[in-house]
Image: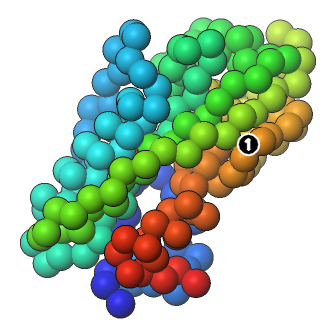
Amino acid sequence: MEKIILASNSPRRKEILGKFNIHLRIEKSSVDEKVNEGDIPEQVAMALAFQKTLDVAERCDDGGIVIGADTIVVKDHHILGKPANYDEAFNTLKKLSGTYHHVITGVAIIKANTYKKVVFYEKTKVKIKDLSDDDICNYINTNEVWDKAGSYGIQGIGSALVESIEGDYFNVVGLPIARLSSILRKDFNIKLI
Ligand SMILES: Cc1cn([C@H]2C[C@H](O)[C@@H](COP(=O)(O)OP(=O)(O)OP(=O)(O)O)O2)c(=O)[nH]c1=O
């Protein structure tokens, strides 16, 4: 089977894809994740995923299928990325408290050498419980928030903050594996299962 290169520094993406019986290599991408006010969230997630994937694909002289992703949280049309500091994490969690938001993960698949590509996104709706200021401070102090879009991790202590989700859980964690596996099979003739 053709080797798969995951263009990501994310331990979660590695864990999700690493479960399958495939020839997997990890290559870190070095893309500056810039977002501008007014950008369309779905397009941002797909564009960033594409940039990360292309950055790695251009280095893969020996071929392979390169996969990259980008996860953002969207609340009232505003994109909430990873928090830069305590105040940003606090304000983000305060905004998410007691309400619904969407988690969008853009995914790009590029066949190195031929540059055949597929880019898509998946969206999951999440409701966060009502959080007191104390709850928010206590959660930030777990230090789980820093490398997570929207300042929470559903797979960790943040699980206690999530009231409900509609859609793919793995999309929230950073890789919509069900959709990805269908596309790998259909468009790249790669079977994860
Ligand atoms: C909302 C949410 C996000 N996240 C993570 C998924 C992503 O890894 C991260 C958003 O950052 P990304 O920029 O998508 O990814 P990354 O910087 O971790 O890795 P790379 O760019 O190298 O692929 O937030 C969770 O782990 N759990 C959650 O519940």
* Residue at x-position 72% and y-position 47%: 167
Q: Where is residue 178 in the image (x, y as percent from the top left)?
A: 61, 64
Q: At label 1, which amino acid type do we have?
A: Ile
Q: Which colour scheme is used?
A: rainbow
- Reply above or below: 94 against 121: above
**Residue at the image point whose x is 72% and y is 34% from the top:** 125
With respect to residue 38, does 121 lie above or below?
A: below
Where is residue 106 shown, x and y percent of the image? 45, 44
Please identify the quadrant where the N terminus is shown.
bottom left
Residue 163, x across and y down, in percent? 88, 34
Categorize mark 1 by other alpha carbons within 10 Å: few (<14), some (14-19), many (20+).
some
Q: Is mark 1 on a helix, strand or loop?
A: loop
Q: Residue tagged by mark 1?
A: 154
Name the outermost residue toward the bottom.
1
Q: Tell me how many marks there are.
A: 1
The answer to whether residue 98 is left or right of residue 79 is right
Examine the rendering and report whether any part of residue 136 can be seen.
no
Q: Ligand 1 within 8 A of label 1's CB? A: yes
Tell whether 172 sits left or right of 23: right
Residue drawn at x 52%, y 80% as measured from the top left = 192
